[in-house]
Image: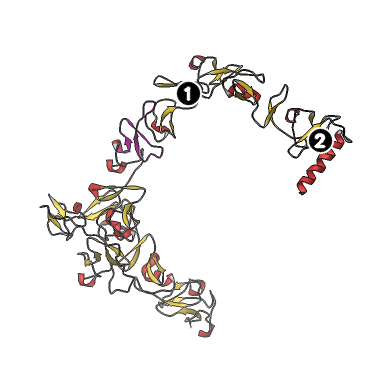
Amino acid sequence: MDCKSLTLLICVSCLLCVSKQDGGECQEDADCEIEFAACINTTCICPVDFVPNNVYTKCLKVVHSYGENCIDSVQCSTSLKSGGTCLNGTCTCQVGYHYLRGKCWKSLGLGDKCKHSDNCWVSNDFESSVCNKDHVCTCATGYYQREHTSCRRESHKPGEPCGISLDCKFDNAVCTMNRTCEINTNVTLSSFIAPANEKIIPPQTLSLAVGDNCTSSTDCPEHASCTPNGICLCNMGFYTLDQTCHPVSRYIGWSCLRDEQCSLFGPNSICLNKKCACNNESRFVEDQMFCWITKKTGEACTDDKDCGSGNVTCPGGKCACMPGNHPSSGKNSCRTDSVNFGEPCVESLDCVFPNAICNMTSKNCICKEGYIRDGTKCKPGNGGECLKETDCTVARSICVDSTCKCEEGYISNLSFDSCMPLTKKYGGQCESTVQCSELNADCVENKCKCRPGMHYAESWKCYVNVNVGESCTHEGQCPPEHSHCLKGFCVCDRKYHVIYDGNRTFCSGAPALFYSTKVQLSLISCLLYIFIRL
């Protein structure tokens, strides 16, 4: 393989091969269309320590350090490797990568498969996790695990640094205002807080950055120290931003400007309305000072804390509700069972007795549609399920196609607890409008009558009033006085003609010049045309 056959290749001479344009040969420098390229051995190449940009129009200087100025990401990836990128004119690591020992490493969390410890990136602490013999990222020796996503440095004697009291691993220990572990003698606890007006130092070129190799702490940025492994690391109580160290907030609800200031509480903490808080997928566990991911019921767990707070535990490795409780519809909490009528509820799942639902207005348990209350139970009413007729508790109700229905000639009331006789005659007796349903009428003063704006057609039922000239589908829709439905329109009977009195059209038997059906239809069409034009 030679340079001529490649778009980009690092040659034996340590020069980068580029093309005349994107793959041609050259005889002299002037033949090279890439700016700053030279013609060497009939091939256009960038000088040592330069790389072609992404569109192969210019040779750019390689950037060797994190935080240096850049134009194109190719300048950064040469030294920072595949995770390097040019962001806002500065070489940095891509999202999902972290900077360590002059390189951007792909970030892996606890439990992830790994090949190298430098990939394990937990709690913004390069030394907090390692790739173990099983090639899994785990907390390093001298660190303890919080939840499933965080490793914190242990302190075993007074005077050693801490961020929270949990870091102090000896009896009666507390993390003091000075961020050191001491024996608790009613000392004032740390009230250290990152003020809301904290100034974030902009990215700058440093002699050494957090994550760089060092020989002493004086080599490292402010608030950072050189670890025994020779790496600059932020001190307890500080977080890493742009490879420099900034103070963290020390308690949920305290002030912040960005999510990183809340990192003390784990990867699920956020800065919300300038205060540290847990995100929607987690909750704050006081004794752990941590935003703990809340598992849903049925999901795997190792500790009760995994399963959320109240009425839920971790028996047998899965989150489950305690007796007398049930999972919510989202399975992210457990709520108390409602076992009787009238007990409070949020959703129908809360009403655990058969055929009950939650009334979303009153927020208490009632029988669902088609069921009626019988003591402390919901029994099938009209519309309820049944296997045999004795399951149907309402008089004159029978079991049809596994559903309780009123027998022929009867109809259910709106409470599903009574079968009422259908009224089939206009003006007939009724107690409820449902009895007049076949007539399309209302029950008014105990008689089936048409609603306002409707009329009754003999041998039919109540129809919406339709004027002469308007569309119709059958006879009963047209006004009952001297009209009928013909070819989809209401027209006057023979020897009657259309009259419009300013409010309505109707059929009159007064003398008229035109009364044939054909003339009426023509006249109606003309009137409709005039109305449309107006």
Q: Is residue 319 covered in magenta?
A: yes
Query: In the rendered image, which residue does mark 2 sit on?
Result: 498
Coloring scheme used: secondary structure
Magenta-colored stretch includes residue 207: no
Residue at which label 1 appears: 371
Q: Nearer the viewer, mark 1 or mark 2?
A: 2
From the viewer's perspective, tell me whether residue 501 is left or right of residue 292.
right
Number of residues whose C-alpha sits closer than 10 Å to that of mark 1, classed few (under 14), some (14–19) or many (20 or more): many
Q: Quadrant of residue 450?
A: top right
Secondary structure at badge 2 equals strand
- Answer left or right for 10 relative to 258: right
Residue segment shown in magenta = 317-342
In front of the other: 1 or 120? 120
Q: Is residue 442 left or right of residue 499?
A: left
The residue at the far left in this view is 185
Distance of label 1 from label 2 (alpha carbons): 54 Å
The answer to which quarter of the image holds residue 256 is bottom left
Q: Residue at 88% x, 36% y: name it.
A: 514
Query: In the rendered structure, which amino acid carries the disc numbered 2?
Result: Val
- Residue 139 seen: no
Q: Residue 511: percent from the left, percent from the top?
A: 87, 32
Please provide percent x and percent y for residue 418. 52, 18
Q: Compared to 366, does 199 lie above or below?
A: below
Q: Is residue 282 above or below residue 117?
A: above
Give amino acid for label 1. Tyr
Give the SS element for disc 1: strand
Which residue is most to the right?
513
Determine the main secondary structure of the stretch shown in magenta: loop
Q: Is residue 517 visible?
A: yes
Viewer-nearest residue: 423 or 229? 423
Q: Which x, y percent locates residue 507?
A: 80, 32
Image quarter for residue 179?
A: bottom left
